[in-house]
Image (cartoon, rainbow, N blue to C red):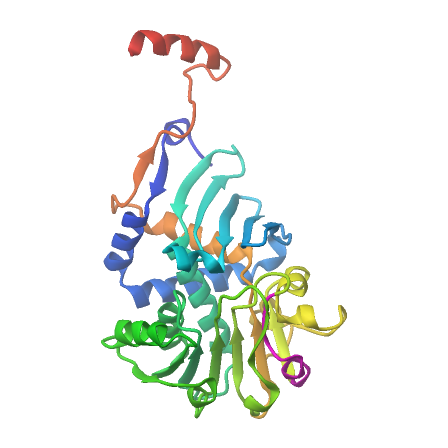
Amino acid sequence: MMTPSDKALVPFVSVDHMMKLIQHIGLEEMLKGLADYIEADFRRWELFDKTPRVASHSEKGVIELMPTSDGEDYGFKYVNGHPSNTKDGLQTVTAFGLLADVASGYPVLLSEMTILTALRTAATSALVARLLAPKGANVMAMIGNGAQSEFQSLAMKAIAGVDEVRLYDTDPAATRKCAANLADQGLRVVSCTSAEEAMLGAQIITTCTADKQYATILTDNMVGSGVHINAIGGDCPGKTELAPAILHRAGIFVEYPEQTRIEGEIQQLDPDHPVTEIWQVLTGQAQGRTDDRQITLFDSVGFAIEDFSALRYIRDKITGTGLFLPLDLLADPDDPRDLFGMLQRSKTQN
């Protein structure tokens, strides 16, 4: 419960603060910590308010709000996805988020979430790969080497036991960028000239491309038995990466079906095609991988509970660090009934 002395200033974690916090904690430790918070919240999934994100689509991209609450805290994220932004030197995805106290309605944290979204997405991918990938999986094909690729690779190393990443992107410069960034991170890094080459020997295949269209990054004949596919690029209506035949061969796992059927790979399937929710696997209510030859597919579009978990983590970790700005966001008159009086008194204070 928030006390009156807590409510005047709201901690704001800027991009600079976030980068310093990551350096303070350590990137891989932070990825593991985020995965722990996400797993804890998925295990209490039924407590949360859940709704597909509120999306405003345009020809250029999408702007979305992602809200949820566990009854004690409320969180939301504002996020955009504009694939053509990179041509203008802008990020494809930007985001910020807010955490609030349900009892009072007062915000308790405002944070950048462009970097944090990359971290929570990677942590979720690796958490699920640890659940579903074949035993002993240690090689990942990273198809799409944009802004998410390094985070995905390092999360798979820290959480899922991957020690080799095989990189491919239609833009060779993106692959060179990713390989250079991963060069001293404790991974074997192999740059490839085709998706097929990248997939040689890989037990985990991550697809993360940005084009807002129905695409076929993986064709049916490219995918053999026993692999785990981490499909994170299809995240809005009309944007997919996998051939439909792959979906029919795979055991499909999702975050929130009502959202994934609109935005994920499974928008290509009949509305009643069976899928398994990840929280059910974590709580033992459903089975994950059934045998060594099964293809498992995590059709991940991102869900608000993951952002909620990430904001909870940041709230807990900034305590005592000074890595935030106390933000004068809330009008806080001495008499809560006299907002006008506070305005009048400000004349004499200026």
In this rendering, position of residue 26 left or right of residue 336: left
**Quarter of the figure with residue 43:** bottom right
**Quarter of the figure with residue 137:** bottom left
**Quarter of the figure with residue 126:** bottom left
* Magenta region, residue range: 239-249
Q: Nearer the viewer, residue 220 or 112?
A: 220
Residue 335: in magenta span = no
Residue 243: in magenta span = yes
Horizontal and vertical percent for residue 35?
A: 43, 65
The answer to whether residue 15 is above or below residue 84 is above
Residue name at image x 43 percent, y 66 percent: 123
Horizontal and vertical percent for residue 279?
A: 59, 66
Q: Nearer the viewer, residue 320 or 189?
A: 189
**Number of disc labels:** 0
Q: Quadrant of the C terminus?
A: top left
Q: Is residue 91 visible?
A: no
Residue name at image x 64 percent, y 52 percent: 51
The answer to whether residue 349 is above or below residue 186 is above
Q: Is residue 285 visible?
A: yes
Horizontal and vertical percent for residue 258?
A: 68, 60
Horizontal and vertical percent for residue 268?
A: 69, 72
Residue name at image x 33 percent, y 51 percent: 317
The answer to whether residue 158 is above or below residue 15 is below
